[in-house]
Amino acid sequence: MQQRSVGSTGLRVSRLGLGTMTWGRDTDEHEARDQLIAFVEAGGTLVDTAAAYAEGRSEELLGSLLGDVAHRDELVVATKAAISARDGRTHVDASRGALLSTLDASLRRLGVDHVDLWQVHTWDPRTPVEETLSALDLAVSSGRTTYVGISNYTGWQTAQAATWQAAVPGRVALASTQVEYSLVNRAVEHEVLPAAAATGLGVLPWSPLGRGVLTGKYRTGTPADSRAATSQFSRFVQPYLDDERTMAVVEAVCRAAEGLDLSPVQVALAWVRDRPGVTAPIVGARTAAQLRTALSVEDLTLPPEIVAALDDVSAD
């Protein structure tokens, strides 16, 4: 698999990343192992998790596979902090103390002394941005992470954070921003992507398959084994299923796939992977077989006329 630089840093990662949001909850140890094996065999290096995923069990499961399925140095391990779930509610805390204590807990669960990329999972309006960013500086200076980034920041938040870090010598430059980006959600193109380009950040799109709808599996209903059929993810997927514009984009992707003798997954993933500024889409799969379909996009480049048609039908 081809490698790309993360923004203007020296960090290089595979141009597809492996997402582990469902590991430790919907994805058990055996399936996770098969996924990681398939990913490594395809040349993948970037594995993304978060302290909030399955209340830490995603990190624990990934940690149990490090050194077994793949040597630690062969992978770029990325995790995130600032979000936690308590009493069935989501809590955001990007204060310096909360971030660093979460990082230490992540390192214990992963069984490593450092991660390669540590990201602030979301913006915290209650904490001054300079305090949040000071935690990133401390994490690097203490050797707990090598690179740092942000996630789910708006355009102005991205520009402010990146500029603050670049303003004074000695602060650690941000490497990346992780945001939702797909053919059915191109909102980041208006402000986030220009801000990332102007400040030298690599873009790591999450949900590049539009929360699963771009696979085409929801065209005739909701499959019983799909995320939309689960209590955890039904509210996550449903807004796209209820949107006429989204379903029109899905139909266009499926028609393009049929014409190219490809799967909708391959078409949708190739489109976002090759967008300007994108470093590596983060792909999460329910099974190793699904992941292998996504990984097969490595040797695929969409014809320019197909890209133009998809751009037109999906434009905001």
Image (cartoon, rainbow, N blue to C red):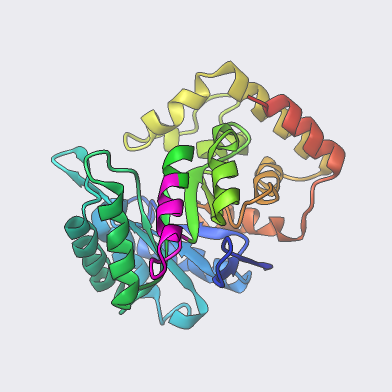
Count of number-bearing discs: 0
171 drawn magenta = yes
Where does the image place residue 201, in percent across and percent down from the top left? 54, 55
Rendered residue at 68%/47% (across/down): 275
Q: Which residue is the extreme one toward the front?
A: 168
In percent of the image, x 36 and y 35: which residue is there?
230
Instruction: In this rendered view, identify the residue nearer to me: 59 or 204.
Output: 204
Residue in view at x 42 percent, y 46 percent: 160
One can see residue 154 in this view: no
Direction left: furthest residue: 87
233 vs 226, nearest the viewer: 233
Camera-side residue: 71 or 159?
159
Vertical order, 200 against 256 (above or below):
below
Q: Where are the magenta residues, as a range?
A: 160-174
In the rendered image, residue 307, in percent from the top left (x then y), is placed at 78, 39
Q: Is residue 173 above or below residue 210?
A: below
Image coordinates of residue 245 in percent, x first then y, are 61, 19
The reply, left or right, for residue 281 in relation to residue 147 is right
Q: Is residue 107 magenta?
A: no
Looking at the rendered image, the quarter that the N terminus falls into is bottom right
> Which of the 4 image quarters holds residue 312?
top right
Q: Is residue 125 visible?
A: yes
Q: Position of residue 33 (x, y in %)?
A: 44, 68
Using the rendered view, name the quadrant where residue 316 is placed.
Answer: top right
| Residue 70 placement, left or right of 39 | left
Q: What residue is drawn where x is 61% and y is 23%?
A: 247
